[in-house]
Amino acid sequence: MKYRLYKPDDFDALYAIETVCFEPPLRFERAYLRQLTRARNSATWVAEENDGKPVGFAVVEWRPARGGRVAGYIATIEVLPEHRRVGAGGALLGRAEVSAREAGADAIWLHVDARNEVARRLYEKHGYTEAGASENFYGPGQGARILVKDLAKDVGKRAE
Ligand SMILES: CC(C)(COP(=O)(O)OP(=O)(O)OC[C@H]1O[C@@H](n2cnc3c(N)ncnc32)[C@H](O)[C@@H]1OP(=O)(O)O)[C@@H](O)C(=O)NCCC(=O)NCCS
C-alpha cells in the first residue's frame, strides 16, 4: 500500500469509496466532500494499491481554537472492505495527524458514530480518548462520541 496526498483527478474514486463505506445519513454529499478536499485548511490523504487504484482516504481539517491555538479535526477515514485490517486506516490516521501538526495543531478531535465499535478501536489504538458525546449528531437517535488526542505530546513523531 502507498500513501500520498489527494489530486483533483482522484475525486470520483474517493466518492465511490464513500458510497461503499457509508449509508445516508452518515454518507457525505458529493458537493460536501468536494468542498472538504478543496479547502485550504484541509489535507486529504489517499491509500492506493500498487496499481495506483485508491482504496481508502482520510480528510483532516484544522481551525483556530481557544487561546490562539489550532485544533485538527478528522472529517473522515474510510477504507474499502476488502483492504481493511492491514493497517491502511492507521497509516492514513497517522498521516492526517502529521498534516494537522504541520498546520500548527496541538490537538486533534473527531466525531464517531456511537455504534461504530470498529472505528472506535482504531482511534483508541492510536491514542484517542473519549471527551464527550453529541446526541443526535447524525440524525434522530444517532449519536456520536467525541474523541480527542493531544498532538503536542508526540512532536517530531513521524507517520507510521
Ligand atoms: C475504521 C476503518 C477506517 C479501519 O480501517 P482499517 O484499514 O481496517 O484499520 P487498521 O487495519 O489500521 O486497523 C487498526 C485497528 O483498528 C481496529 N480494528 C479495525 N478493524 C477491526 C475489526 N473489524 N474489529 C475489531 N477491531 C478492528 C483494531 O484495533 C486494529 O488494530 P489490529 O489490526 O492491530 O487489531 C475501516 O474499518 C472503515 O473504513 N470502516 C468504515 C468507515 C468508517 O467507519 N470510518 C470511520 C469514520 S469515524
Image (cartoon, grey):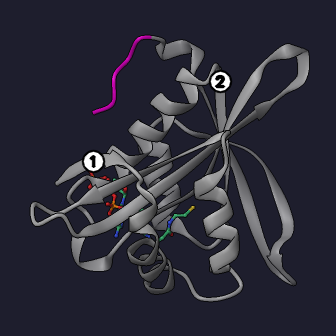
**Local SS, label 2:** loop
Q: Which label was assigned to residue 3?
A: 1
What residue is at 43 percent from the left and 52 percent from the top? 122
- Which quadrant, please, contains the C terminus? top left
Question: In which quarter of the view is residue 85 placed?
Answer: bottom left
Q: Which residues are magenta?
A: 156-160
89 or 38, nearer to the observer: 38
**Residue underneath mark 2:** 105
Residue at 54%, 52% in the rendered image: 59
Q: Is residue 32 magenta?
A: no
Q: Is residue 89 above or below residue 156?
A: below
Q: Residue at x 10, y 66 (%)?
A: 51
Specify the quadrant of the image occupied by residue 13.
bottom left
Q: Compared with residue 100, is residue 61 higher up or lower down, i.e. above or below?
A: below
Quarter containing ligand 1?
Answer: bottom left
Q: Is 159 within the magenta?
A: yes
